[in-house]
Image: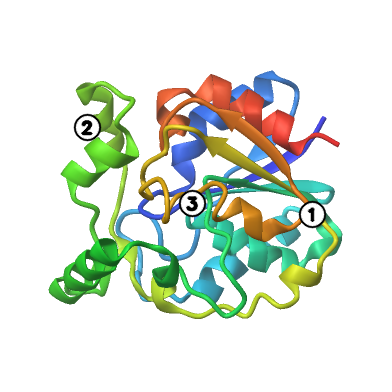
């Protein structure tokens, strides 16, 4: 049995993992899905990246978890890298699922295409709380293109505005890049949330991990909604010894 802690990405909260966590439990494992600080509906959005990190650290410590396989999706990859710096002794492996692996001193904003940088900056400036609401056409065509329209709409209703400040903050990951903790990269091969090629997830992000295990599956960026059963099995494959 493995203990998984599942860290969601931007615009999501922990409930996005419900189907995947349920399948992991059916497979005999334990799965937890905390919500990052500043994420979800009707919460204070005035948070920085470290607030997100500390919310996961506290969750793991308060629940007295150990030997954890820590999974990060998308923006969650930046969080699990920092969590690993804080509590490496409680973790067994890191799994980056189509996730950002930032360079030392880099930010999320550094690793997204210029048209997204410009759009997100404008949306944050137009908001009254420095957040970015993901436009439905982008969600439909590049995040969840492998769903039918009904599922795309129902999943979109679960999203909430994303705090913008964590996108901009430069992260000191020097300790992360010195850790000897095992790492995996799980790549959904039709994920175009970051455009393929120069800005794509794999091998651009995965290649920064050094020694890592590569696990691949078909699907787009939101297979936690479109194919949760296969995603759970691939997370097990990525997390095993």
Crowdedness of circle 2 by 10 Å Cα count: few (<14), some, many (20+)? Answer: some
Rendered image quadrant of residue 162: bottom left
Residue under label 1: 64
- Closest to the camera, between mark 3 and mark 1, is 3
Question: In the figure, 122 relative to 230: above or below?
Answer: below
Residue under label 3: 74
Crowdedness of circle 1 by 10 Å Cα count: few (<14), some, many (20+)? Answer: few
* Residue 218 appears in view: yes
Residue under label 2: 153
Distance of label 2 from label 1 (alpha carbons): 37 Å
Q: Secondary structure at mark 1?
A: loop
Q: Residue drawn at (58%, 65%), measured in percent from left and top?
A: 55
Q: Is residue 192 left or right of residue 60?
A: left
Q: Quarter of the image for the N terminus: give it.
A: top right
Question: In the figure, 86 relative to 147: above or below?
Answer: below
Q: Residue drawn at (65%, 60%), measured in percent from left and top?
A: 208
């Amino acid at each position: 049995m493995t203990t998984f802690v599942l860290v969601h990405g931007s615009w999501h909260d922990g409930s996005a993992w419900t189907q995947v966590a349920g399948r992991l439990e059916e497979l005999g494992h334990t799965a937890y899905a905390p919500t990052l600080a500043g994420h979800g509906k009707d919460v204070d959005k005035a948070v920085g990246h470290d607030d997100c990190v500390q919310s996961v650290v506290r969750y793991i410590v308060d629940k007295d978890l150990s030997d954890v396989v820590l999974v990060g999706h998308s923006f969650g990859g930046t969080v699990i890298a920092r969590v690993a710096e804080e509590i490496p002794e409680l973790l067994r492996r890191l799994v980056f699922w189509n996730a950002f692996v930032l360079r030392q001193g880099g930010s999320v904003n550094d690793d997204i295409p210029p048209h997204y940088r410009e759009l997100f900056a404008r949306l944050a400036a137009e908001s009254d709380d420095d957040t970015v609401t993901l436009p439905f056409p982008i969600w439909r065509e590049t995040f969840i293109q492998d769903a039918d329209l009904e599922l795309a709409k129902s999943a979109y209703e679960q999203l909430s505005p994303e705090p913008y400040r964590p996108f901009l903050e430069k992260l000191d990951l020097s300790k992360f890049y010195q850790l000897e903790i095992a790492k995996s990269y799980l790549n959904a091969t039709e994920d175009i949330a970051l455009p393929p090629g120069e800005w794509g997830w794999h091998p651009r992000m995965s290649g920064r991990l050094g020694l890592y295990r590569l696990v691949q599956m078909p699907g787009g960026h939101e297979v936690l909604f479109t194919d949760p059963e296969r995603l759970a099995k691939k997370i097990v494959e990525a997390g095993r010894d």
